[in-house]
Amino acid sequence: MADNFIHEIIEKDLESQKYGEKVYTRFPPEPNGYLHIGHAKSICLNFSTAAKYGGKCNLRYDDTNPVKEDVEYVDSIEEDVRWLGFQWDERLWASDYFDKMYEAAVELIKKGKAFVCDLTGDEIREYRGTLKEPGKESPYRNRSIEENLKLFEEMKAGKYKDGEKVLRAKIDMASPNINMRDPIIYRIAHATHHNTGDKWCIYPMYDFAHPIEDAIEGITHSICTLEFEDHRPLYDWVLREVGWWPQPPQQIEFARLNLTNTVMSKRYLKALVDEGAVDGWDDPRMPTIAGIRRRGYTPEAVRNFCEAIGVAKGNSTVDISLLEHCVRDDLKEKVESRNVIFDPIKVIITNYPEGESEICELENNAQVPEMGTRQVTFSRELWIDGADFMEVPVKKYFRMFPGNEVRFKGAYFITCNEVVKNEDGSIKELLCTYDPETKSGAGFEGRKVKGTIHFVDAKTAVPVKVRQFNYLMSENEAGEQVMNEETMREITCYAEPRVAEVEAGERFQFFRHGYFVADSKLHSKEEPVFNEIVGLKSSWK
């Protein structure tokens, strides 16, 4: 990442030898859903920071809530991290440390810093107070150390039902920071855990588990998003009061990524999947890393985007057009061009010999001559884009209209002479003539035309399904994010034949339309399916 305030903190710590030469970070996802583009920023920041300072970065699963977690999410998280170009030093689980966390909780009880509470969840919330009023102490707050140790042991042994008792830190019910008002650090959950089975029926809360995990692993800089800023005093309190680590890690917060037209809530994204509003977590419209991978975004583009937005202390919203710019910028010199015709109109070259065809040479990438050329055929019947013809042209329209001459890219000058229509008034075909003296690449020098359009040979063209996407969200008049009703359209286009021969995942520029990728799930050589990655220019309004 570019220089940022986090790196400045790290460099001061290196200078003072706070942690010696060590810079250890971690990426700690909860395996309860697929990661999204917001997580990509955190992945890039944690892994690249460790790399910059010759340190290490662990992948650690925050699996303290057995009810919501699934191995499907674990697999997807690892695929996402690897796809972005990173490799963790160790793969670890919060549940690896359950024994140590239990010991730490017992330590707090022995020091008079934690107590077993019988209040219900609703009562605890009621006792907590408000931002303006202090909370009330629990009637169970002054239980003896002996009674707390006995009750906590009974909680562990499974004597009580879910919600019947909790273990709370004993801090300060009048603290201006609500997180410090005797927070719950353990709750009862009779649920089988994917890693520890039925060994435990009590589980640590995230705010208690996280600092301990970091300390056990020797993490030096625990980098997390801004919503944890108010939790930092509790993070520090846990490490200080447990007291086992002479040089505890420090938590540093940065602004999370917010993108226009994008929802960044795992809960909301899961609802879209569960309700069938999208075709799974990897639907190309989804802002999940799996979704943007299937959409055809490149890991380089995502990393460049994370670099470009930098690391800030305050929340803000980034325009999605910047992400699209990074994708476009990364693809422009990487992919070859292909002719694909949208909203096709048939063109008949009336003075071209029937039954004959010829080869035209087209460049694969105008910006990268080293990518070479390819051959397409030209014959009497061709397809052109619907957008490249107007029966009654508007001002400064230089493409095809009756009486106008244009260049067919890689081929000849063509003049439109007549529009043939169907009974319903729609265009059946355009009758045109070509000038055989004007072939591209034959050293032709002469008159100029203002318009150049592309084509495919009707005899050899293959139909391909193209899927174009709209943003999932848009802003209404009140400035609120609302779900768009129309988010995808599927159209059949005509393509030069080699487009049907590609493998899933191959990317191309469809000439004058944008960048497209052969869909990883639906594409086959028998039935080609392409997803629009991004347009050639920003369509941002």
Image: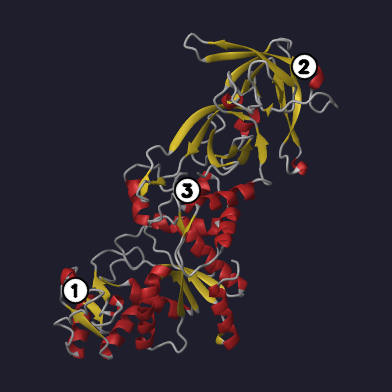
The residue labelled by disc 2 is: 435
The residue labelled by disc 3 is: 291
Report helix, strand or loop for mark 3: helix
Contact? badges 3 and 2 (CB < 8 Å)? no
- Residue 312 lies, with reference to residue 236, above or below; the image says above
Residue at left 35%, top 82%? 238
Q: Circle 1: is it few (<14), some (14-19), or many (20+) Cα within 10 Å?
A: some
Separation of marks 1 and 2 at Cα, in angstroms: 86 Å
Q: Tell me if 283 is positioned left or right of 494 in this view.
A: left
Tell me the kind of residue under disc 3. Answer: Gly
Residue 270 place in picture, x, y as percent: 35, 51
Report helix, strand or loop for mark 1: helix
Residue at left 34%, top 42%? 276
Residue 430 visible, this orientation: yes
Of the two numbered discs 1 and 2 on the same chain, state the one appearing first in sequence. 1
Tell me the kind of residue under disc 2. Answer: Asp
Separation of marks 3 and 1 at Cα, in angstroms: 40 Å
Contact? badges 3 and 1 (CB < 8 Å)? no
Tell me the kind of residue under disc 1. Answer: Ile
- Quarter of the image with the N terminus is bottom right
Q: Circle 3: is it few (<14), some (14-19), or many (20+) Cα within 10 Å?
A: many
Q: Residue furthest left?
A: 139
The residue labelled by disc 1 is: 124
- Nearest to viewer (mark 3 / mark 2): 2
